[in-house]
Each structure stands twice: as structure tokens, then as C-alpha cells.
Image (cartoon, rainbow, N blue to C red):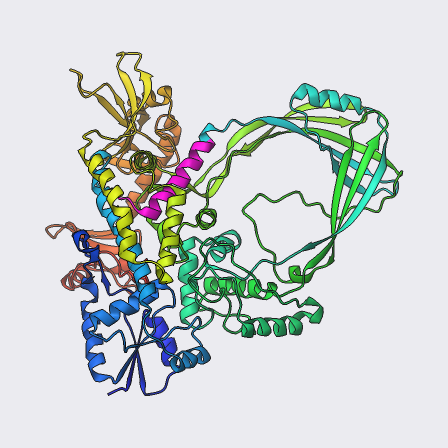
Amino acid sequence: MSKNLVIVESPAKAKTIEKYLGSDFVVKSSVGHIRDLPKSDIGVDVEAGFEPNYVISPDKKTTVSDLKKLVGKSEKVWLATDEDREGEAIAWHLAEALGLDVSETERIIFSEITKNAILKAIDKPRRIDLNLVNAQQARRVLDRLVGFKISPILWRKIQPGLSAGRVQSVAVRLIVEREKEINEFVSTSSFRVLGYFETESGNSFRAELPHRPAALNEANNLLEELIGAQFMVERIEKKPGVRKPAAPFTTSTLQQEAARKLRFSVSQTMSLAQRLYENGHITYMRTDSTNLSNEAQSAALRQIEQDFGPEYTQPRNFKSKAKGAQEAHEAIRPTNLSVEIAGDNDQQRKLYDLIRKRALASQMADAKLERTTVDLSNNQSDHKFVAKGEVIAFDGFLKLYMESSDDEPEENNGLLPAMRENEPIIAKEIEAVERFSKHPPRFTEASLVKKLEELGIGRPSTYAPTISTIIQRKYVEKTDREGEERKYALLKLKNGTISTHTQTEITGAEKSKLFPTDVGTVVNTYLVDQFGDILDYQFTAKVEEEFDEIAAGDRKWNEMIGSFYDGFNEKVEAAVQDKGRARGDRLLGSDPKSGRPVYAKIGRYGSMIQIGDVEDEEKPKFAGLIGDQKLETITLEEALKLFELPRSIGLYEGEEMVAGVGRFGPYVRYGKLFVSIKGHDPLTISAPEATELVKEKIEAEKNKFIAVFDSEEPAIEVLNGRYGPYIRQGKTNYRITKDANAANLTLEDCKEIIAQGPAKKGGAHRKSARKS
């Protein structure tokens, strides 16, 4: 019998902590949440002050039973779940489910899993903080009320299976409204005038005209003014400058920087950070604090002095800029700053390296710069060219780390050659290149997190699950878009002659950006119309502030829910009474053949075009959208073309090839063979293109069969599959072990494998130790 039972959330965390405690302690994991509101009903008794009805999750009943047995054998129980509100709530749920006395059970917290931190926590236990628990209960109950009341309305009004969420719907709104801005944006062009110059000593540099002509003729006139012009240095200005390091990482800044520097998704970053935390390499990864402890700051300064010298040290304290910052006590940092490499795999090591460098850089000296501006005048016009250069006089923190940015990089000013005022300068070439104004950028996962944080919406534990939810529910898609070719004008003045050229460039390419789906757009429009206050950015931020008040003990959680519920429920009842549907119908015009109206709309199974009305004597015609087509932007001409599918595109070896769109996307049908043509437009794919794809599919089908034993009923087949060779008999698949040579299998070998049973369907997915 053990004297002490310590319960944590994750098995990895338990394993690490167990190393630091003696034989008197047993450390076990709850594997995340053990209780939640039931999935089958709302689980909240509105009449009884919004009392939640928590149930033990079906997959946790064995865990709870095992923990109860251990509790019965232990003299003392320590709840060591995470240090934020959700961790506090999990500790409370454990106490309730295991029959522990909340007023006596030891609660310990620590921001890092190190021996020193664990032993300090054991020395200073406290009781479960019910204010923090109630703040988390308020979030859970409010989110359940919103989701459970609104989701069924969306099923009836738009499409079955949809859902609404207090924070997720606001995140979708941000993406939809940004897309609307982009669609309404009208690009304008102007001409950037650049001069390529040379000093008397033969050193080259570039300068730019601050004024940008708006039209081609204006740019041409400007260059004409400069034919034969003689340039000179009118003014040289040198100014000292400094760059300061960024603060150590919070949850959101880590997510942003890992996305920019390492191309990690938000959920990937959190998963890797959790492993680093559980293995004792970094402090707790859900935090909006930028603070470093005195010990960590001292350790950072010692490490910097050792690695770079005392001139590179500069102690700093940072204050969080996040609205309602709370949650935790320290920024994300290594538990031991002298450890340069940590992590079980390459991705963990890269993230650890980023965290370490950011923490150290925050305590390093400013970078000192010298910024030079040179104005060039000429004898034929008032137009002055400006050259800018920058020299790093002392690299400071830049020696170790520089923060990335979501903005496109500015021109690299670089180093200017030595010049003196009134020095003659030779113009080698002057060009005016047409540039176009750009629409607001679409959100990446990281920039969406940044925006949510700026608005005060959500908290460190909610960013990653919010983004995962809106992508999984297909309100938003994270994707790449190829750019389009665009022509632009280029004028060059060289050797006294102006030449005009037409150049091409690729514009509008997108990488890992968030696009609203048609369903997401229609759902957002409906929710903003019917429940605008819930999707209001200020309201959502205000709710977070109220959660903070509950956590501080300044407000009762069920009273906060009550003040929200009455008005909300009235709107729900009104929406239920409204019998209309919200399909996002958009009238595109009339079909020139029949004169019937043409609509873009959401149907039961997705986005579609409809010709005619349901009330008409003649039934409506329907066609699904393809590729990047959107309800908001599709034109009448594009919509009518969809009714040309399926279309015949020619013959191959006497058999017709037909292009169409099916459940799994665009295809070409060749006899009984269906060939995916993703990346091709079924309306424009040519016969030669289709023929090549058909040939490849036929060849792949030939190679699919390794062996066929048709003496059996049904036949036994040995096939090449996506994940390697396998056996199929009838509709059942059987796994072939890696050490078996599929090509040499006999009928008896196959029968033996079949006798052992079919391959397991699906894979064993590891459940996260934390669900938000």
C-alpha cells in the first residue's frame, strides 16, 4: 500500500514526475477529462440555476474505477493537473468522481516538470480553487447552451449536421468578412520609379522616386523629363537606430512564430509543445504571460554572458499586451537554458530551439544600427530620388534570433557606397515598373490566432481547438491557391532612349491560407442576421472578461449565465417559429434557353446551381459547383456551363471518354473505369489529356493484381494497395505481414492468412491528453 497517490492528466507527465518522487508515491494519469456534459441531451437544468449534469465519459469508466481502487489504498491523494482553469476543473471533476473531500484533498501546481518544481509544489499544496472551477463551468455551460440551441436550427434552415459555437462562429465570421473585403476590393495600379546609379568611384546603388505616377503616359512624361539629366548628391543624413528583442513566447506568439519559421500548424505546435512540457524540457505551454521568473532571468543572463560576452546582456521585464491576460505565471521557456538541444524527434528539437533562442534573446542587448538616407537631385526636374541604407553597428540580440513577420518583407536597404554631398552621380538606367495595390491578406492559422487575441476572444487553451473545429466542420478550408498570370508595363530610360515593354508575372498565389466554404458563408450570414449579438466581437470579448471576474471571485457564474440566457432564448424561439430556409440563394439571372431563373444556392448535399423554381410545373434542373467556384462569385455564364456535364470528350481505342463531376470530384469515365482528374477542369479537359490519364489508370489497374486464385468461391486475390500488398476474398480484406513476400504466396498461404481473420478497420488513434 502506497502512502501517496498523485493524479495527473497525461501518461507522459506521470512517467516524468514519477522519476522525481520516492517510493512512497504512486503517480497515475486520468488521460485528460473524465467527466463532461452528456452528448445525448443538453445536460443543463435551466430551471435549477443552470445546474450542469456531468456524466463520466464512457471511455473513462475503467480509468475511474482503477483510480478509485488506488484511492482506497492510499493515505493521501494529490491532484496535480495543469495549472490553468481547465486543469483546475479537471482536478475538481476527479475529486467529485472519486469521492474525495474537496476541502481536504491536496492540490499542487507547477509551471515546469522538474525535480525542483515538483518538490516545491509538494511542500506547498493548496486546496482546489472553486472560483477557477466555476469560471470553467461557466464557459462549458454557456458554450453548451449556444451550441445545443442553435445547431438544430441550422439543420432545419440550411443543412443537416451543421453546428454553431460561441467562439468558433466568431472565428468563421472573421474569415468570411475578410473574404468579402477581398471580393469587393478593386485593385489600382501605379508606377514605381527606380534609378540605378553609380558613384564617381564606380560603386553601384539603387534609389527610388517617392512619387508614383498613376498612369502610363504620366510615367512616360516623367522619364522624358529625365533624358540627359545630370544627378548629384544633394543631402546625406545619418541617424542612429535600435532594434529591441521580442518578449519570450506566450501560447499565441509561439503558434505564430512556429507557423512562420517552421511551417507548423497551430495544433501541431501545441502537440509538440505538450510533449516537450511533459518530458520536462519547457515550462507550461498554455499561457498569456510574457514574464520570466527571477531565477530564469538570472540563468538567461549567465548563459548569454558565457556564450557571447557581458556586452550582450540586458535584463528586461515584459508586460503582456493581450486583453484579459491571465491564466499562468510565466512565459514559455526552457526549464534549463544551458541545454541547447532537447526533444524526441526533429520537430520537437526545432520547436525547442525556437523557444530557447526567443527566451535568451529577450534578455540580450538592443541591436544598434546606423541608417543612412541620400537625396539625389538633378538639373532638369524637381523630382528627387532617395536611396536608403542600413548598417548594423552592434548586432546585439540579432546575433542569436530575429522575429519573423506576417507582412511581406520590405526592400533590403543593404549598404550604400561612400558618397559626399554635391558629388556628381551617373544615372545608368531609370525604369518605371507598373505595380498593383493588393487586397487585404487572407488569414493563416497563426494570423487568425493573432486577431482573436487582439480582440480579446478566447484564451490560450482555446485557440488551437477553435481552428481545428472550424476546419473539421468544413466551414473553412486551409488550402493553397495557384496564382494567375498578369501583364504589367515596364518603361526603361537608358542611353537617352525610352523603351516600353510588356512583362508577365504570377499574382495571387496563396499558401496555407484559410478560405470560407459556401456552407461557412451561408451559416455565418444566417447567424449574424438572427443572433448578431452573440457573434459580435465586443460581446464575445466581454464574455471572456466576465469569465475572468468569476475566476477572481467577483461574480457568480450562474448569475452571469442567467443574464445572457433570457434574451438569447427569445431569439432562439423566434428563429424556430420562422419556417423559411436559409440556403444563401443568389439569383444569377435567367436561362437564355428557357427563360427560367438561375440560382446559386446551398442544397442538402452542398453548393449547387438550380434552374427554375420548385413551384414550377417543370421540375428544376440542378448541377454541382466544381473546383474553386463559390456561391458568392460564380457568374451566370459559368453556372450555365455546368449543365454541359457530363460531356463526351472523344474516343480512346474505340471507347468513349466522358467527363463529369461525382461524389469524389471531377472524373473521366471510360467504360466501367472511373479516372480521377483532380487538377483538371471537366469542362475544358482535352481528349489527349484524358487519354494520358486513362492510360495511367489502366496500367495501375494491371499492376494492382499480384495473383488471383479463381478456383475458390469467391476468388482469392493478392493485390497491391495504397499501404502495401493485401489479400481480398469477396468484400473482406486480409493483412499480409511485412516479412511475407506477397509475390510468392501460394493458395495455401492465403487460406492460412484468411483463417487468422480480417484486417482491423481503421487505426488506433491516440487520444489527446487534453480536450478543450
Question: Is 192 placed above or below 169 here?
Answer: above
- Give left or right: position of 152 versus 381: left
The answer to which of 516 and 290 lies nearer the viewer is 290
User: Chief secondary structure of the magenta span?
Assistant: helix
Q: Is residue 165 magenta?
A: yes
Image coordinates for residue 718, horizontal then vertical, percent: 23, 54
- Give left or right: position of 193 versus 722: right
Image coordinates for residue 549, horizontal then vertical, percent: 37, 58
Magenta span of residues: 162-182
Total marks in image: 0
- Give left or right: position of 4 versus 377: left
Image coordinates for residue 212, horizontal then vertical, percent: 68, 29
The answer to which of 542 and 738 lies nearer the viewer is 542
The part of the image, by quadrant, that contains residue 296 is bottom right
Can the viewer see residue 515 in this picture?
Answer: no
Q: Quadrant of the C terminus?
A: bottom left
Query: Residue at coordinates 33% horizontally, 67% vertically from top-left?
Result: 88
Query: Residue at coordinates 57% horizontally, 26% vertically from top-left?
Result: 188
The answer to which of 38 and 48 lies nearer the viewer is 48
Image coordinates for residue 76, horizontal then vertical, percent: 27, 83
Q: Residue furthest left?
A: 713
Question: Is 242 placed above or below 597 here?
Answer: below
